[in-house]
Each structure stands twice: as C-alpha cells, then as structure tokens.
C-alpha cells in the first residue's frame, strides 16, 4: 500500500481510537446528528479558503473536512451500517461509472458531453428516474440558498426543464425584477404594514433564483460569485476604515458622502482585482 493509503488507514485508526471506550469523551459522545453542523461549517471553511486564495489554509481545512468524513464513517461502522472502506469503495466505483469517457469507450468531445454522460449515469443509478421518488429529492435542503438554487436548476435541467442558453433566461430576471418593484411599491403605498412584506420577500427570492439560473447557464457558480462579492465588500470597507482621517472610530460620524467617496477610492485602487 502506498503512502496515501497508509496515511488514510492511520487516520481511520486514530478516529477509531478516539471513539474507543477509553478514548476521548467528546468524540465518544458524538452522533451523526450532533456532527451535522460541523460538516457544514468545515465545508464552508474550505470554500472560504478557496475564495481568498489561501492555499495553506485550504490544506488545513481539507483535513478538517476529511476528519468529519472519517468520524461519520466510523460511527456508521460501530452500528454495523457501513465503514470507511465502504465509503472509499463506493466513491471509487461511482467515479469510474460516471466517467465512461475515461474508463470505457464513450466519446466526450468537451465539458457539455461530460456533463451529459454524468447525468445519464446518475439517471441509470436511480433506475432511470421512473418515478421511484420525487426528482428534486436528490438536492440537499441544507445547502446555502444560492447553492441550493444552482443544484435545483441543474437537477431540473437533467430532464429538459431549462432554458437553452443564458440569453433566453435573462428576460426572466427583468420580469421578476419588475414584479419585485411592483410589490415593493404596493407595500410602500400601504405604509409598510407590519407583516405585510411577505410578497416583497417572495419576489426578492424569485429575482435571486432567476439570477442564479442565468449564472448557471453561463457556466458560473452563483454561490462562488456571491462569496467573491462578499470578499470585495469586506476588503473595500476595511480600506474605508483604514483611510478615514479620524480612524475607524469615526465611521458613524463620517456621513454617507464621505464614506461613498472613500469607497470609490478603495474601488479605484484595486484596479482589476476580483
């Protein structure tokens, strides 16, 4: 067995030791349910390291995420459901099965062909999608909202419920934006009654979902795009704080014109930085 295999075996044995009767009380107390939030947190920290380009941080965060995989696999092993070896075997078999253009003779001229073959393999695994379960059930409900929108759009596209290209999807953004403005105007005209923003909230969601579909059809990940926008906002706002004559403590007193001018300076100083 190579170094990678030896290393994985060693990691699994460490986790088994932590879960042993004389192991770590915290690790022994964990269940699939109690660890659920940690799996989500670690996946998001991996994504954050990628967003900011922190390669050394990415290495550490991938390790933390792998720990969650091992913990869940060992807990399942203890109940007799499956073990770490089964997780690796199933994943290996799935990768081979879903890449017939690499491990078999299926032709694939480009990314679109690969995505088609992947979708066909998934349908075959599910029995052809013949109604065994609702089609969208395969999309996790615990994803961040934009990531879930992306996954829902991709899943619906597998059965042909999609626009041919982004140009056809773009008018939907304009349509939903107009409906949002209409709902917003009605709410404002009524004096913004308490609890009366439900329609505005619904239309806001429709706009975001429509924009997510356009991003998907452009080959972009809307969640990743928003993470980059968040990073830009953090960076530029930090520049505003750093450059205020009176220091960060004068943020509230600076006033919008001064803050906006500082924002534009920060934006201009970045040039083409993403």
Image (cartoon, helix red, strand yellow):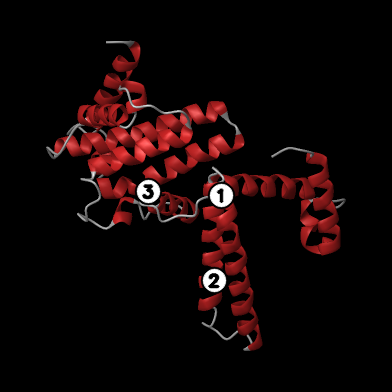
Alpha-carbon span between mark 2 and mark 3: 26 Å
Residue bearing mark 2? 203
| Residue at (47, 33) in percent of width and height | 111
Q: Nearer the viewer, residue 224 or 172?
A: 172
Q: Does the image show residue 197? A: yes
Does residue 243 appear left or right of residue 38 in this picture? right
Alpha-carbon span between mark 1 and mark 3: 17 Å
- Residue 239 is situated, as x and y percent measured from the top left of the image, at 77, 45
- Residue 227 is situated, as x and y percent measured from the top left of the image, at 58, 46
| Residue at (34, 16) in percent of width and height | 4
Q: Does the image show residue 222? A: no
Q: Which mark is residue 158?
A: 3
| Residue at (26, 46) in percent of width and height | 32
Look at the picture and state if 153 lies above or below 177: above
Reading the chain from its start, which is encountered first: label 2 or label 3?
3
Point out the frontmost of discs 1 and 3. Answer: 3
Alpha-carbon span between mark 1 and mark 2: 19 Å
- Residue 166 is situated, as x and y percent measured from the top left of the image, at 57, 51
Reading the chain from its start, which is encountered first: label 1 or label 3?
3
Q: Which mark is residue 215?
A: 1
């Amino acid at each position: 067995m190579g170094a990678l295999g030896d290393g994985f075996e060693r990691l699994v044995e460490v986790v088994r030791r932590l879960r042993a009767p004389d192991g770590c009380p915290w690790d022994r107390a964990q269940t699939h349910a109690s660890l659920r939030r940690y799996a989500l947190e670690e996946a998001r920290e991996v994504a954050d390291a990628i967003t900011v380009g922190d390669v050394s941080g990415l290495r550490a965060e991938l390790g933390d995420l792998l720990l969650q995989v091992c913990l869940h696999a060992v807990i399942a092993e203890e109940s007799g459901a499956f073990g770490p070896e089964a997780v690796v075997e199933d994943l290996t078999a799935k990768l081979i099965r879903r890449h017939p253009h690499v491990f078999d003779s299926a032709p694939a001229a480009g990314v679109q062909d690969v995505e088609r073959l992947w979708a066909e393999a998934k349908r075959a695994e599910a029995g052809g999608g013949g109604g065994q379960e609702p089609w969208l059930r395969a999309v996790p409900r615990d994803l961040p909202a934009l990531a879930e929108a992306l996954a829902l759009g991709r899943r619906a596209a597998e059965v042909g419920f999609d626009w041919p290209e982004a140009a056809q999807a773009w008018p939907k953004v304009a349509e939903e934006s107009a409906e949002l403005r209409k709902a917003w105007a009605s709410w404002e005209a009524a004096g913004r009654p308490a609890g009366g923003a439900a329609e505005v909230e619904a239309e806001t969601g429709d706009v975001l979902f429509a924009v997510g579909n356009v991003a998907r059809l452009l080959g972009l990940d809307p969640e990743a795009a928003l993470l980059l926008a968040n990073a830009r906002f953090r960076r530029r706002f930090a520049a505003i704080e750093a450059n205020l004559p009176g220091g960060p403590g004068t943020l509230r007193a600076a006033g919008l014109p001064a803050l906006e001018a500082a924002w534009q300076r920060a934006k201009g100083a970045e040039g083409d930085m993403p």
